[in-house]
Image (cartoon, grey):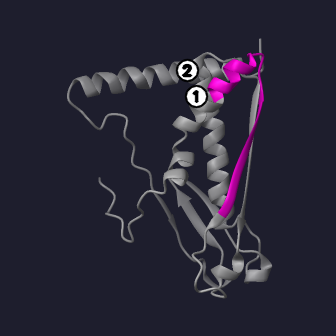
Amino acid sequence: MAALDPYLTRKAAAMNARREDWSAARASGDANAGVVNITASSKLAGVTGARPTQMGDHRIVSDSAPGMAGHALGPTAPEMLLGALASCLVHTYVIQAILLEVPLDSVEVFVSGKLDMGAVIGMDLEKVSTIEDMRYYAEIESSASSEALDWLHAAVEAACPVLNTLKLAGTVLPKAPEPAG
């Protein structure tokens, strides 16, 4: 028995339950079954410059490095983006391993990128400030064949919502509608 088996079993049961619920709802005409609204907000916390950031029911502090008048009290926003990608990739590896019946002993994802801070502070007004050269590397421990792991990697590439959002660069509107309910 692999160390992750109890979690993977619990995760598979939860996924099956959601699939049954959402399939029944869609069969009854609810086209939005399975669609979740997600929210985040952040604000400046006075003279510290730190930014308490609410994501769903969770709050973390985002901050700048001392060289940008911050106190390094938490990750920078670009680091949070890379962290969100890493977390989503790990979760997607778990989900796809369950769906493809690929045994999984461990999964860890490393993400990196480069950010031209000169463009951020207005030194190069011609350049749009983006995180460039984003790369990820997944370290997978599994007894599966290399062919099965290739299928797993391809399935993750196709299914990871944060990865696909970054790769497809959808529209971000300047003013979001008010949350429903």
Q: Where is residue 64 in the image (x, y as percent from the top left)?
A: 71, 74
Residues packed near mark 1 inside 10 Å, few (<14), some (14 to 19) or many (20 plus): many
Q: In this view, does 74 lie above or below 66?
A: above
**Residue bearing mark 1:** 95
Q: Which amino acid does label 2 sit on?
A: Leu
> Type of residue at label 1?
Ile
Q: Which residue is drawn at 70% across and 51% down?
A: 135
Q: What stretch is highlighted in magenta?
A: 132-152
Q: Residue at x 77, y 11 (%)?
A: 1
Residue 21 visible somewhere in the drawing: yes
In the image, 11 versus 153, the foreground residue is 153
Q: Which mark is residue 38?
A: none
On whether residue 88 falls in the magenta region, the answer is no
Q: In which quarter of the image is residue 25?
A: top left
The reply to whether the C-beta atoms of the residues labelled 1 and 2 are less than 8 Å apart is yes
Residue 32 image point, x, y percent: 29, 38
What is the secondary structure assignment of the residue under circle 1?
helix
- Residue topped by disc 2: 99
Q: Does the magenta stretch include residue 146?
A: yes
